Amino acid sequence: MRNRKITLSEQEIPRQWYNIVADMPNKPLPPLHPGTKEPIGPEALAPLFPMELIMQEVSTEKWIDIPDEVRDIYTLWRPTPLYRAYGLEKALDTPAKIYYKYEGGSPSGSHKPNTAVAQAYYNMKEGVKRITTETGAGQWGSALSFACNHFDIECEVYMVKISYHHKPYRKMMMNTWGAKVHASPSDQTEAGRKILSQDPDSPGSLGIAISEAVERAAMDPGTKYSLGSVLNHVLMHQTVLGQEAVTQMDKAGDLPDIVVAPFGGGSNFAGIAFPFLRMNLEEGKNIRCIASEPASCPKLTRGVFRYDFGDTIGMTPLLPMYTLGHNFVPAPIHAGGLRYHGAGAVVSQLLRDDLIEAVAHDNLEVFDAGVQFARAEGIIPAPEATHAIATVRQEALKCREEGVSRTILLNLCGHGNFDMKAYEDYFAGKLVRHEVTSEDIEASLAQLDTPIPS
């Protein structure tokens, strides 16, 4: 019987996070003040984040030490296993070798606690009593609820309304860890009330939920805000999983030709891809890193590179990003946390420099791929992860057509055990193929007024 599981010892959990900014040929452009449109410094972020996280956000140091207390909590689920997907290879009849890094064994069932624990720790060290945040599918909200509970910090979550109703068990996870959860847009904030006055039936979006969470944090000096993706310190914390994957691939005597991950704001993709991109930038390797996004929210493949707000109301600093426009409201389909209008500044710059790739898949294609993976490998993937599986399948079938063997590595970011409503709708034929129109994108982009400097 073939050994399909590559494991590490507890001593092999990384002791540092990797900051790809140190190796980037072109650094990300600076954030701008939402009012003056002038570049801002670390002090402008102090009302929202603890200073240690702000310093990580602007750091150009290559390696950031992981605090012992954070690493100790990581041992609850890290190191995570790497599997060779023999079943999927057989189902696809491909000469490709497929591996997947499985992050579904964490307490909240995804990769998100890798940064949630770190962010809660630094807030605790600064004496913060409450953290607000947003969540799409609920993976981030449940991860931060778990982390805040560990450090005795109150957690208030604004959950995109369509997911709040589709995924009640994610809400119950958050409640179990002591978090207060609101369906967003809500009547708890000025931002939420404004959106509801314009559209009482709004399904919500991550941009709207961010506006609500930021507003709540800005109103109370004892409250800070936490983000589960997009920002550099968040992406950096996720590199523990990619660093483990580098070691595991080495133990397997292999090296990926292609690395694939789902893409919403960037944390999922950065976690697996950045440590391999380091090998490209440092060692001259040629590993293709592909971000997989939904065709219903295609900021990397059909958006523009512009300064834009991270939220809908316009409370956050302006970030240089690939975006569909901060007023863009994605269709209420089962793409979970990938339904975000913009991409992180670091990932956006990497794409602008052609150092990474991006593809988009429609919602029927991804669930077909997810079901095939579940039947071949036994793990039911989260809807977010099915997007990357669709890309893996696409690349593996190319290998079959071309008669070549390539090694493909997938970040299986979480399980879909709380996402069965999405699978139920898929099997019942209730999901309709969806792709956003060019007219919708152009209308949203027309509202942007801050260009990228030449």
Image (cartoon, grey):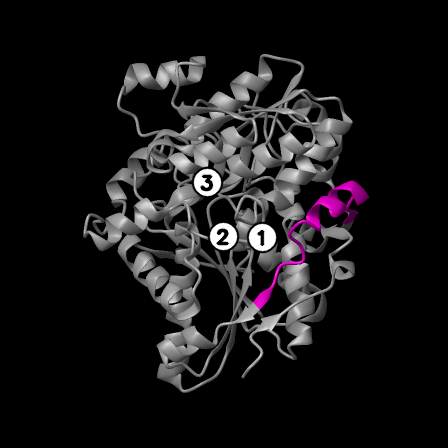
Q: Which residue is mark 3?
A: 342
- Above or below for 356 versus 223: below
Q: What percent of the width, then of the height, locates residue 347?
A: 55, 49
- Above or below for 104 versus 165: below
Q: Quadrant of the N terminus?
A: bottom right
Q: Amino acid at mark 3?
A: Gly
- Above or below for 256 versus 439: below
Q: Which residue is mark 2?
A: 414
Residue in the foreground of this view, choosing between 446 and 117: 117
Q: CA distance from mark 2 to mark 3?
A: 22 Å
Element marked by disc 3: loop
Q: Which residue is mark 1?
A: 270
Q: Which residues are magenta?
A: 64-82
User: Which of the marked residues, 1 or 3, is nearer the chain's N terminus?
Assistant: 1
* Residue at 49% over, 52% down: 414
* Residue at 70% over, 22% down: 128
Element marked by disc 1: helix
Does 32 sit left or right of 450 as displayed?
A: right
